[in-house]
Amino acid sequence: MSSRSVKVRYASLVREGRRHSGWEGRTVTERAFQVDLRGVVDLLSRHLYSSPRVYLRELLQNGVDAVTARRAGEPGAPARIHVETPEHTGDGTLRVHDTGVGLTEPQVHELLATIGRSGKRDELGYARHEFLGQFGIGLLSGFLVADEIEVHTRSAHGGPTVRWVGHADGRYLVELAAQERGEVGTTVILRPRRDAEEWFGTHTVTELARHYGALLPVELRVGDTLLTEEGPPWSRPHPTPARRRAALGDYCRTLFGFTPLDVIDLEVAEAGLRGVAFVLPHPANPTVRATHRVYLKRMLLADNVADLLPDWAFFVRCVVDTEELRPTASREALYEDDLLGHVRETLGDQVRDWLVTLAHSDTEALRRFLRLHHVGVKALAVHDDAMLDLVHRWLEFETSSGAMTLAEFSRRHPEARYTPDVDEFRRLSAVAAAQGVGLVNAGYVYDAEIIARLGDREPAAALRPLDPGELTTRFGVLESETELRLRGFLRTAERALDPLGCAVALRSYAPASLPALYLTSRAAEHRAELAESRIEADPLWADVLGALEPALAADRPRLVLNHANPLTRRITTLTDPDLVTLAVQALYGQALLHGRHPLRPADTAVLNRSFLGLLDWAAPADPEERK
């Protein structure tokens, strides 16, 4: 604890605008902050690190940094980290040995007994980008599982072995070790707390060490078990590209549990990043953020790193190693900065380029991919011209002529239409096709935006939105003699539906199996919405909305009766006005239900009344019962 006293004169307080009565002649004391190490450890365990398991990762990071520092001056120095569990040591402790640069006694004070002081770390070479972490905060993580940390270290620059013992309450001692360490390097010794013994079992330690350190460029052992592999799987040599792809497929099955549809090589030189992306062989949920496995200088950072790729690339899972991207304080995620933004954009471009290449080299594989992951491709096509061309040429849309690409559909139907409503497509596709009008279902996500962009790029091949009311212009008109004969029927039918705001027309059209079709123009839909809003609005706004209605009064929904349908023809021969009213209202209700139109209370009432009325007409009451 350091302190210094400064006499503060009353006059200076006045000049600074901080005059306070009673301060004249007093002494103001400056003091250093008190650090409660137990509180810091609690903060680390509860808010910084996701689990106590990271203690081993931090110890491995310190060991790798020490080895890296030693090899900077001694390229041929051994690079080993050896972990011994209580089962190996026999004294209940866990020991982590490394052959790194080691520390002298002054360095022990600077690196192990301070928190957050970076100056000396910079001078000693432990803040350069080659290193994974820093001794102080990394070693502190040992207090997540132990109340005492003991370090034996011998420096490559000479000097005896130094022993440092730190306690969770903030106390520490530094002394010469009673027993000289046999070689240059450091040994960290932890004795588990009673509530943390599970993290020291041989199986647990082995799995944690393999999980975090299998790709490290050092020899890593737990007991006699060698854990490090021969390098990242994507960098290993293979005799042929096919053998390499098969090996990476095996790696993906082991890591993620699926056989990839394809493997994409990834590289961003600015970030020292290399790796692979595995294409999912099954549909992925676009609303669930994809996460990826990221290594930092070949030490595992995390299995669930998000935001490495653009949102549209949710159909791949990546494994990458990076040299330059910055980790967060917990070293379990990536820090969002300009470099990460550049990496995200570049990796997205590489996935996109893979798709473009696939379109030219293996169209069948592209079709398989699009059947699974069309949503991600469409999301990219909304703002990317190359993907827009790919979608136009290769992605099948639902149309009135069956599933086909927009390019093929435009060739077959020069005056094609589209609808942004799935239900409208389902009720009108057969009718539109029968009238020779090609119709595309653009009711799914991104479809309407893609069609609009295609129209902007190629106006000659643009698809126009369908107005259902225009279909009536393509229906067959009845012969004048038939129309004159049915004039009385039409008047009765119009009276039956006039209270519902619906007009009646009699036409002949395909398919003949359809007795009636309810059609409403966009203007009529707008009028209906306006009327509904007027009912719900306050008096002032109701008057304003009411002033707009006369301009739309001529646009009414229309029930188009199909004279080509045998049932409809029989209904037109009825002479009883009441029966005609029931039959027409029943056709109206059936057309609403068939077209999946919303039913208003008045529509429901008419549907029920016509149904019961027709039943009553079909099964008349016994005259005796009426008495």
Image (cartoon, rainbow, N blue to C red):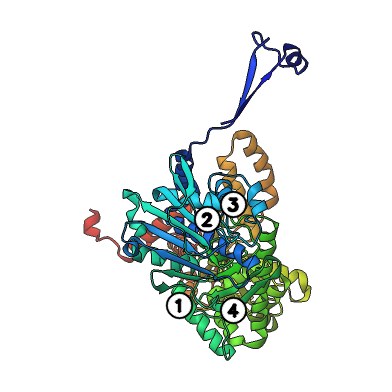
User: First in sequence: mark 4 or mark 1?
Assistant: 4
User: First in sequence: mark 2 or mark 4?
Assistant: 2
Q: Secondary structure at mark 2?
A: loop
Residue closer to the observer: 421 or 546: 421
Is mark 1 in CB contact (under 8 Å) with mark 2? no
Judging by the rendered image, the residue that carries numbered circle 2 is 160
Q: Secondary structure at mark 1?
A: helix
| Above or below, 310 relative to 410 | above
Is mark 1 in CB contact (under 8 Å) with mark 3? no
Judging by the rendered image, the residue that carries numbered circle 3 is 528
User: First in sequence: mark 1 or mark 2?
Assistant: 2
User: First in sequence: mark 3 or mark 4?
Assistant: 4
Which mark is on residue 385?
none
Left or right: residue 471 compared with residue 227: right
- Give, as a three-letter code, the residue at label 2: Pro
Q: CA distance from mark 3 to mark 2?
A: 91 Å
